[in-house]
Amino acid sequence: QVQLVESGGGSVQAGGSLRLSCAASGYTRSVVSVGWFRQAPGKEREGVAAIYTGGGPPVYADSVKGRFTISQDNAKNTVFLQMNSLKPEDTAMYYCAAGPTWDRMLVMRQSVYNYWGQGTQVTVSS
């Protein structure tokens, strides 16, 4: 089992920044991919960014490219999502997820992941 705990959410004005953290515990050796997803009210959950725990270039949704950066500290079993130039449309609950495989073409799909955190709220005001 793997447990994931997100933190770092909050309320900011448009143009501001937030840094989300996803701390993993438990059988973390089974984790190959970590993804960040978000869900706004009335909308489906969507993939934002994903990273391979073994290294290599991450994957980003087009809507966040150039503004968000996903990174990891393997020693601390923590993945970060640095969010800059935030927009009101970034407002959502943000979730991190962990999975046992890595495929760049698939990592933005929820079905790839078998562990999920409880989420952290991000609110961006105009």
Image (cartoon, helix red, strand yellow):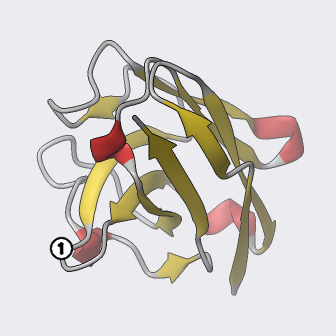
Q: Measuring 32% from the left and 12% from the top, which residue is drawn there?
A: 66
Residue farthest along the front direction in this orientation: 126
**2 and 94: which is toward the camera:** 94
Residue farthest along the top direction in this orientation: 66
Q: Is residue 85 something one can see in this rendering?
A: yes
Residue, disc 1: 43
**56 and 18: which is toward the camera:** 18
Q: Is residue 17 left or right of residue 21?
A: left
Q: Quadrant of residue 59?
A: top left
Q: Measuring 54% from the left and 53% from the top, which residue is drawn there?
A: 122
Residue 36 image offset from top left, x and y in percent: 44, 53
What's the amino acid at mark 1? Answer: Lys
SS category of the residue bearing label 1: loop
Q: Measuring 27% from the left and 72% from the top, which residue is drawn there?
A: 110
Residue 62, placed above or below residue 94: above
Q: Is residue 31 something one can see in this rendering?
A: no
